[in-house]
Image: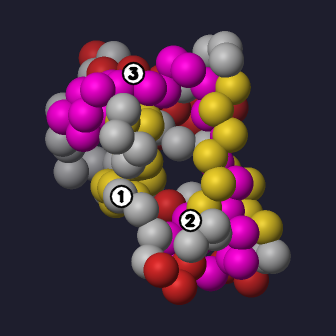
Amino acid sequence: MQRQAFLADIFLTGTNAITLDGKLVNVDGNGNRVAPAIFGPDKVIVVAGVNKIVRNVDEAIKRINEIAAPLNARRHFVKHQRAEFGTLPCVRTGTCVDCAHELRICRYTVIIAGTSTRDKGRINVVLVGEELGL
């Protein structure tokens, strides 16, 4: 299914952070969420709550390291009931420590700063006026 996302007409996703100047900042463990946002589907719809808005890329990375990544890792641990996810440092400490764990969920950092002229209108952001997601 992860590979099929590239062939979808429309790819619906979220984001870890949106900067005030419109950059989408995402961290992903396998790339299956960030890669199709960059290339593949004809249309990308990003849905995000106002809790994802940050001033700049530095704040975005801080938000991801301190909120989104640890909570997402913990969600994987609880949802999949796999004890090894509980060994991730961010699950144990509640913050990213830039580990080298084999189950690390933050291997790929992608900053989308816009699209090329050819792809104009491909990525669409729907900002919801409430807190959504991690």
| Percent of width and height locating residue 68 | 44, 29
Q: Check disc 1 and give the amino acid type.
A: Ala
Q: Which of marks 1 and 3 is in front?
A: 1
Residues in magenta? Answer: 35-64
Q: How many labels does the image show?
A: 3
Amino acid type for the residue under numbered disc 3 = Ile
Horizontally, is 102 left or right of 98 in the view? right
**Is any atom of residue 115 visible in this view?**
yes
SS at mark 1 in the image: loop
- Residue type of the residue flagged with mark 2: Ala
Q: Name the residue under label 2.
A: 37
Res 57 label: none
Residue 116 lies, in percent from the top left, at 44, 77
* Residue drawn 51% across the image and 18% down it: 51
User: Looking at the rendering, which quadrant does residue 17 occupy?
Assistant: top left
What residue is shown at x 21% (from left), y 51% (from top)? 100
Mark 2: give few (<14), some (14-19) or many (20+) Cα within 10 Å. Answer: many
Q: Which of marks 2 and 1 is in front?
A: 1
- Residue tagged by mark 3? 67
Please, what secondary structure does the residue beneath circle 3 have? helix
Q: Name the residue under label 1.
A: 113
Q: Would you say residue 133 is visible in this rendering?
A: no
Tell which circle, 2 or 1, labels the residue nearer the N-terminal end: 2
User: How far is mark 1 from mark 3, CA to CA?
Assistant: 22 Å
Question: Of the residues under marks 1 and 3, which one precedes in the sequence?
Answer: 3
